[in-house]
Image (tube, helix red, strand yellow):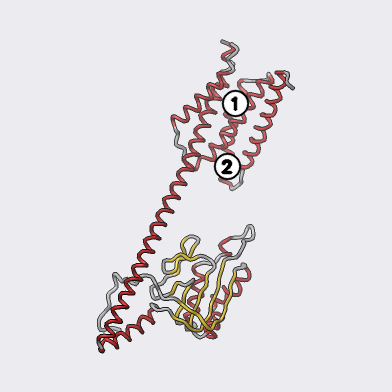
Amino acid sequence: MNEARRFLSPILVCLILGFLLSTAFYAQQRTRERVGQRKAELTEIIKSLEKERENLKKETRKLRERLRAYEKEAAAHEGILGSFTKELEELKFAAGLTAVKGTGVEVSLSDALQVPPGEDPNNYIIHDYDLRVVVNALWDGGAEAIAINNQRLVSTSAIRCAGNIILVNSMRLATPYKIRAIGNSERLYRALQENKDASKLLWNYAKSFSLIAKIKTLSHIKIPAYSGSLRVEHARAIKGED
Amino acid sequence: MGRLYLLPILGLLIGVILGLVLRVDIPSVYVPYLGIALLAALDSAFGGLRASLEGKFNDKLFISGFFGNTLMAAFIVYIGDRLGIPLYLAAVVAFGVRLFQNLALIRRLIFQSRGWG
């Protein structure tokens, strides 16, 4: 009996040790499962939403094509409508629903290739507000059409941040960013130089944080049409006011 | 009487089964503390095994060491967390090194006692 009592404490310790072991094992297992599940769920949601968007885009394109066919038909058949059709074309052009070409500039921006250890990585990447600064400077310089990575900017376009990507027209863009603008190349370039924020970004910050910023003046730029939806749900036109 | 040394192993098995059956839900914030406490407990258990092989086993020292080390390890990690000092690493290294040292000693003691070495 005395012999057995000598083993009491090892038994107790081993019991607790075993309990801790299996509890830790179970806890670890569960954490891993939970993280994996959540991730898989979110990925699934994103994928299905992106698919839906692609389908909707396709449908928009189809509907626009049909509309164009109707317009053409109408223009061919009736003379009075001809002038309307022409006006419609002009309005579409102004609204950014047609692809355009011309002279202009291309601003390329991309994240620094590496962040020095111990530095804030936020300083070494291109943010949504950086794009906005450049875009605003370009509008200021008389840009007639602007696209970021081929996403045409229209009256309802937004440039916003979503995690580590930037959303333009609700499309996900990542570095490198190419901002193309059509207009008088010299004026556009000057506007970038003269705009306080844009020049700071393109010449000062780019250098100190090794961001990549290039400006090219081009004689041939093509900018695609806006391909997103134009649905207006809540706004109503006020009659008699312009 | 000769088989009594199997009792601790039986205790270990019962503990493992108990843990698997009860499935204590530990909030994921406390999982690191559990890990470090477990490491300290393992270290103490192997220390106890070594001591008993050396014939220096002391009941009270063993029990106090087991609970003391386990709780202190978790506490030190908690303090480090609060202060922003990675004491976690210090605990892992300290207990880890001792664990392996004890294992090596246990191996040698077993070899010696059997006359293999």
**Disc 1 and disc 2 in contact, CB within 8 angstroms:** no
Residue matched to label 1: B64
Tag count: 2
Residue at 66% over, 23% down:
B51
Q: Which residue is mark 2?
A: B79
Q: Amino acid at mark 1?
A: Ser
Q: Quadrant of residue A217?
A: bottom right
The first of marks 1 and 2 along the sequence is 1
- Label 2 crowd (10 A; few <14 / some 14-19 / many >=20): some
- Work out which residue is located at the far right of the displayed protein and give it: B117
Q: Where is A59 relative to B25, above or below? A: below
Left or right relative to A173: residue B117: right
Q: Are marks 1 and 2 on the same chain?
A: yes
Place of residue B97 in the rendered image (x, y in percent of width and height, measured from the top left): 67, 35
Quadrant of the snapshot with the N terminus of chain A: top right
Q: Is residue A133 above or below residue B80?
A: below
Quadrant containing the C terminus of chain A in the rendered view: bottom left
Q: Looking at the picture, which amino acid does disc 2 mark?
A: Ile
Neighbourhood count class around disc 1 (C-alpha, 10 Å): few under 14, some 14–19, many 20 upward: few
Q: Nearer the viewer, residue A116 or A49?
A: A49
**Chain containing mark 1:** B
Q: Secondary structure at mark 2?
A: helix
The quadrant in which residue A10 appears is top right
Q: Residue at x 53, y 21 (%)?
A: B10
Which residue is pictured at 61% across the width and 64% down the height? A113
Q: In the image, is residue A133 above or below residue A28?
A: below
The chain ID associated with circle 2 is B
Give how far apart the Cα atoms at labels 1 and 2 are: 22 Å
The residue tagged with tag 1: helix, strand or loop?
A: helix
